[in-house]
Amino acid sequence: MNKRALLVEDDGAIATVIRTALADEGLEVDVCDSIVRRDALLIERQYDVMLTDVILLDGDGIETLAAVQDRHPDLPVIILSAQNTLDTAVRATSRGAFEYFPKPFDLDELVRAVKQAAASTARPGKLVDEGNEGLPLIGRSQPMQEVFRLITRVLHNDLSVLVLGESGTGKELVAEAIHQLGNRKDGPFVAVNAAAIPRELIESELFGHERGAFTGATARNIGKFEQANGGTLFLDEIGDMPAEAQTRLLRALQSGTIRRVGGNEEIAVNVRIVAATNRDLAPMIANGSFREDLYYRLNVVPIRLPALRDRADDIEALARHFLRRAASEGLPLRTLSDRAAKILRQQVWRGNVRELRNFIYRTALLSREDDIDATTISQLLDELPQDASGKDNIDLGLAIARWVERSEFAEGTLYHSALAEFERPLFAHVLRSTGGNQVRAAQVLGINRNTLRKRLGELDLHAEQFSQG
């Protein structure tokens, strides 16, 4: 007998696509667009799997899921949602959903999940409590949706997680989310940065030490492992951990026990490990600076955080969130104009979310107006320091976009105004580099010397002022 699926979806186009794809795989599919009709169909027929949208014509597909599970405890449910937040993913998982798919989704992946759910006899129970507020991660972009899905998959277990990503992408926030929303939320969350601890002290920091273990050890010290017992230990910048500490860390993970520096007692510890690094560990393993066996212990579930440039759709939401956070911390309450948000989205944030946050806090402090406009944003962005390569922290396209946003033009004049604005600094740069030699400048520019002379006159530029003689 074919497997039977119930699809609860009020978007007709999406429903047709899903129904066709599932039918092609041999599933019988009933479609409805409301909770009332869903409940009626569940009484009339037996289903092997149900797919449901969150926002329906007559209610919330997640909020009403408990009633479905009470009457049909063996029915696996797959949640579909355009409300692409970590809160939605967690709500779906906490109510025992078999899987969660943010829209737009990969249709092939959805079909695979439906077939797996229909064939499964295992039903996930309730994983986390409801009503979580103040979730630490924000983002509706597709890359962040994959991060959210991975987070929900590790909440009900104690598998080690390795968070990968550039500096400033929010790796510690991922660790905090896993802790706050998971089954260890009532235990401690302890973070340690391996790069910030002197090599000679890192073992003492992790495992503690006994009095007299070394010069200056005047009392017993309880290390991070013991402090995190029953909770989560976040090992940040794990790629910077020295080799000798890696060996002891591996032993602790394998045995579930630690020994304080200078001590003989084996102490049992029960911690969930979340590690993070902004380094590529593969070449470090190849050259022997990072233990391969430790890598496999930590990298059970990898979560790769996207750089901000790869999730530009989230910049506006992040900026507005940081303005609210800044106000809650005592800075003036500010709002952000749409034009200002557009400029922020075009900016190259090499420091990722951390750089954006710092910039928004500074803007909240320095802005003279409660509504931050494009001019204010542009001026403050122009004051950003140059990066390590000595290049401006913006590219040409962004500079032009800022100039257009700041300026006002009569209709039909933008093209010529932009050319004039661009030509003057370009000609000045070339004349400066050629010492005012118009023949050479014309060659560099690839234009006729007479054309160059004419444009210099129109732009009120004089070659002799760039002469080196």
Image: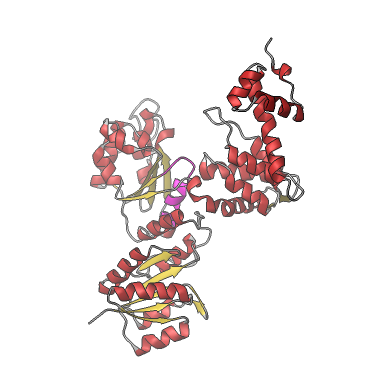
Determine the residue positioned at 36% across, 36% down. Answer: 239
In which quadrant is the C terminus drawn?
Answer: top right
Determine the residue positioned at 49% across, 61% down. Answer: 85
Determine the residue positioned at 71% across, 29% down. Answer: 455
Work out which residue is located at the far top of the displayed protein and give it: 469
Left or right side of 294 for 438 = right
Q: Is residue 170 magenta?
A: yes
Task: Name the main secondary structure of what is drawn in magenta.
Answer: helix
> Can residue 298 be seen here?
yes
Classify 334 as above or below 119.
Answer: above
Query: Foreground residue, 273 or 2?
Result: 2
The quarter holding residue 258 reads top left
> Can residue 267 be seen here?
no
Left or right side of 45 for 340 = right
Query: Foreground residue, 256 or 12?
Result: 12
Query: Foreground residue, 157 or 104?
Result: 104
Classify 1 as above or below 395.
Answer: below
| Range of magenta residues | 165-180
Q: Position of residue 441 (x, y in %)?
A: 63, 22
In which quadrant is the N terminus drawn?
Answer: bottom left
Q: Is residue 398 magenta?
A: no
